[in-house]
Amino acid sequence: LLERKNAILVDGVILNGPVADSEAGEKFVEEATKIIMEEVIKKAADVTEKVCEWQPPEKLKALLDLELKDTGENHQKLLQFCRDVIKFSVKTNHPRFFNQLYAGIDYYSLAARFITEALNPSVYTYEVSPVFLLVEDAVLKKMIEFIGWEEGDGIFNPGGSVSNMYAMNLARYKYCPDIKEQGLSGMPRLVVLTSDECHYSVKKAASFLGIGTQNVYFIKSDERGKMIPEELEKQVLRARKEGSAPFFVSATAGTTVLGAFDPLDEIADICERYGLWLHVDASWGGSALLSRKHCRLLHGIHRANSVAWNPHKMLMAGIQCCALLVKDSSGLLKRCYSANASYLFQQDKFYDVSYDTGDKSIQCSRRADAFKFWMTWKALGTTGLEERVNRALALARYLVDEIKKREGFQLLLEPEYANICFWYIPPSLRNMEEGHEYWEKLHHVAPAIKERMMKKGSIMLGYQPHRGKVNFFRQVIISPKVSREDMDFLLDEISSLGKDL
Amino acid sequence: LLERKNAILVDGVILNGPVADSEAGEKFVEEATKIIMEEVIKKAADVTEKVCEWQPPEKLKALLDLELKDTGENHQKLLQFCRDVIKFSVKTNHPRFFNQLYAGIDYYSLAARFITEALNPSVYTYEVSPVFLLVEDAVLKKMIEFIGWEEGDGIFNPGGSVSNMYAMNLARYKYCPDIKEQGLSGMPRLVVLTSDECHYSVKKAASFLGIGTQNVYFIKSDERGKMIPEELEKQVLRARKEGSAPFFVSATAGTTVLGAFDPLDEIADICERYGLWLHVDASWGGSALLSRKHCRLLHGIHRANSVAWNPHKMLMAGIQCCALLVKDSSGLLKRCYSANASYLFQQDKFYDVSYDTGDKSIQCSRRADAFKFWMTWKALGTTGLEERVNRALALARYLVDEIKKREGFQLLLEPEYANICFWYIPPSLRNMEEGHEYWEKLHHVAPAIKERMMKKGSIMLGYQPHRGKVNFFRQVIISPKVSREDMDFLLDEISSLGKDL
C-alpha cells in the first residue's frame, strides 16, 4: 500500500517499490539447487550413471527448446530446462570421464564457486572485492613458494592460454619497454622459441601479440616429447644470425598430448647464457610441485621468469582457475599492463590503494578464481593435495602395467605424468604386418571405438593422431573418485567395443 | 570389504575403490548452500542489511585466517570461512550498491550459474559441451538480430576488454591477413581511432597487440562525451598523411563514466568512406537495444563490423557474460583465430565438426557464459528484459529530476543512459565563489563522503575526477530491486554524510 501511494509515472514507467518478486525468485533458486544436488552432485560418484547421453546436434536442438521469445516461461518449464540441460550435458565429474585435462568433482571448490556466483564480485579494487583480493594474494604467495622463488608477483587469468600470452607480452615489455607505446612497426623481428610439443596457445599468442606465427621457432623434442636443449641453442644462434631478436623461451612442464616435461634446468642455462626470458607453461604439470615424490619432474622451475599453472586441471579447482606467476617483484607486471583508469583506480581513496591490483590485468571485470582453489587447499591442506597427485599418478602407473600385460593393447611410450597414450589393436589386426595397410586400418580404430563409447555413454576418453603416429587413445587420470576398478573397466570396455573392428 | 580385497600397492599408494568421501562432500555442499541461501540470496532484497562491512586490509587479513597450511580444516571451520567470506564481501546484489556497471541479483541467471559450476563444462567441442555450444549459438543469433544484422558470427569472452581486443585483432587480420603469420615488424604503422571517452581497454588492446598506445588516436568528444565525427575524419586524414595505416575505429555506445553514446551513423559514414573497420564497444550500452523506447541511442549500430556487448552489466547475467558479435559470416573469426589443434579439433569425428566452435577463441578452456543469459531471457522473455531497461532508465530520470530540485546537488550533465554524474556541495561551499579554492575543496568532498558511507555500510557509489572536472559521484542504476525510495535515500544519505564538510 505504501508502495502504491508512492508510485509516480516517469517516462511511461510506474516507479514504486521494488518490482522484482524476490520470494518467487528465491524459491526458484531453491528448486533448481535441489535438482543440481540430485542430478549432478549426488550422481557424480555413481559409475552406473552414463557419462553422456549422446544426441547428434540437430536432434538435440529439436529436443531442447532453445529459441528466445518475447514472453517468458513459467517456473515449471524453466525447471524442466534445468533438468534437460543437465541430462544432455557431458558429466565431466563422472569417474569415467577421462577426455580432457580436467575431471571430477571437488566439493570444497564447488561450495566456493556457489559463493562467488551468489556474491557476484569483480576483482579489481579492494573497495569492491576486499576478501577476494586478499585471498588471491594468499594463494599466489603459496604457489610462488612451491615454485621455489623467494618472492614474486602474479595474477589469475581466464585460462592457461591467456597466461601464456601475458607472459609473452611481459617478456617483450622487459626486453623493450618502448613497444608498449610505440608498437612493433619498425622494430626488429622478435622471435619466440618453444618446443614442437608445446600447447597451441603459444602460436595463438604470437599471432595475437603481433609477433607472427612464423616467428615462433619450434624446437625439436626427443622421442619422449621433451625439448632438446642443444636444438634450442642452435635455434637461438640461428635467430641471432638472421638479425632477429629472440627474447622468449616457453618451456612446457606437462605437454598436452604426451604429458612430457622439458628439461628446465638445461633450458634455463641456455636462457641465462643468451639473456632470454624463460617462461614455463606448467598449466598441466605444475600441480606435480605439490608432490614431494613427483616435483622432480619440474626440476629447475625456480629459474624461470614466469610460470603458468592451472589448478583447475590436476587439482580440480573448477574451470577456470589459472595463475600466471612472475618472478619479478619490482612491479613489472603492473608497469607492463597498467592503464591507470581514473574512475576505478582513484589514488585519493581512504585506504592503501596498493591493494587495488586490477590494473595488472588485461581484463577489467575479473572473476574471483583464486577463491575456489583457496577453499580446497584449506580443506585438504597441502598433504591432501599431495595425496591426490600421488594417487592419480599411481593409478596411471597401474594402467600402464595393465596395458603392458594385456593382449591387444600397445603403449606409445612410458608416460612421465598422468597422460597414458596407447593403441587398442583389434583381433583382426593382431597378426598383420606393421605396414601401410596396418597403420591405415589402425588409424580408424580409435574414432570408431570413440563413437561407440559415446553412444553407449559408458566412458569418455580422447584420441588423436600425433607426430606421424596414427590415432591413439589418450587416457588422463585426475579424480580421486577414480579407482583401479575403473582402470580395469576402461580396458575391458575398449576391448569389448572394438573387438569386431 | 570388496575394496579392501582389491587393494594393491603402486608407488607407495594403496589403490582401492574411490577414496573421496562423497557423502561428507555432498553434505558439505548442502550446508554451504544453506548459508548462501540465507546470507546472500535472501538478504539481497533487504535494504536494512549493510552493503558492506568495511575493514581495512591489514585488519581484514587478521580477521580471516588466510594462510594455507599442510593439514586441512574440518567442515565446521570451513563453513565458518564461508560465513566470514560472505560477511566481509561487498554485497553487489544489495539494492543500494551503485558502485560499478553491474549490480543486483537475477535468480534465473544464478540458478544457471550454479548448474554450470556443478557440471564444470568447457566450451570448445560439441563432444564435451553439446548443450552449451548450442545455447551459445542461440544466444548469439538473437543478439545479432537485435543489432540488426541479417547474419553474423560471434563468441562469448571473459570480459568486454577481451572482446575489444578480439575485434581489433580481427580487423587487423581483415586488413592484412599476413600479419597473423608474419607479425608487425616491417609493416607500416597501424593506427586505431577511438574517442577520448573510450574505455581504457582500447589502449590496453593496442599495447597488447603490438600496435602501441601511441598509435591510438584519441578523437575529441563533445561536452556530452560523444565522439565528434568531423574530428574523426580529420584524424583519419592526418594518419594517412603521415603514411601510417588507420584500419580500426572503436566507437563507444555507453561510455564508462558519462554513459555517452557516440553518433554511430555518422561514424559509419566516415568508416565506409575510408574503408575502416567499425567496432562498437557497446559493453555497457548494448542492452538498450532491447528497449524499443531507448534503442535509438544506438542508431546506426547495424552498420558496425563488430560489436562488444556485455549482458552481465545492465541485463544482470552475472560476471562474466560478454559477447563479441561480428557481422562477417564467411568464417573470418575462425580463419583469424584458429590453430587447428589436432588433439581437440579432430576432423574424423563421427558428428558434424562445424559445431566445434572453440577454435574461434584465443582461449582453450572456456566457460559456458552464454547459458546464464539464455536462462534469464527464457524466464523473462524479451519484454521482461525490455521492462528492466526501461525501469532502470526511468529511475535514472527520476533521480536527475530530484537532483535538480534539491539544494546542494549539482548535475554535471543531462545523462543519456543510466549513469548520473553529480556533485554534492556541502553548506560550507554553497556561497563560495567558483574559483580555485572552491574546486579544490569540492574535489575532496566525494572521497570524504565515500569513506563515511563505506564505513557505515549504508550505500556504495563511485566517484572520480574526469576531463578536468573535480571528483564527482557517478550513480549507476541497474537492478529492478531498486526503487524510487532508494533514490530518495541516496540523496538524503549523501546530504547527511556530507553536511559538515
Image (tube, coloured by chain):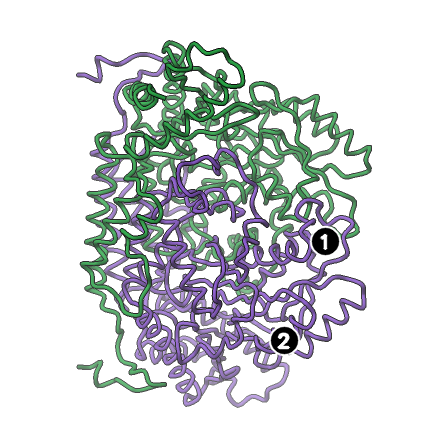
Chain colours: A purple, B green
Residue B353 in sight from this viewpoint: no
Q: In the visual, does B169 lie left or right of A311?
A: right
Would you place residue B458 above or below residue A475 in this image?
above
Quarter of the image with the C terminus of chain B in it: top left
The extreme front residue here reads B437
**Residue at image mark 2:** A269
Give x and y (percent) for residue A331: 54, 53
Is residue B287 visible in the rendered structure shown here?
Answer: yes
The residue located at (27%, 18%) in the rendering is A16
- Check disc 1 and report the residue beneath it: B183
Q: Residue at x 28, y 59 (%)?
A: A108
Decide which of A65, A178 is in the foreground and name it. A178
Image height check: is B145 above or below B65?
A: above
CB contact under 8 Å: marks 2 and 1: no
Q: Is residue A219 above or below residue A102?
A: below
Mark 2 vs mark 1: in front: 2
Q: What residue appears at the point 38 percent right and 40 percent down from the top-left corner?
A: A128
Amino acid at the residue labelled 1 = Gly
Q: Quadrant of the N terminus of chain B?
A: bottom left
Q: Give the SS element for disc 1.
A: loop
Q: Position of residue A100 (x, y in %)?
A: 44, 65
Residue at (30%, 67%) from the top-left corner? A381
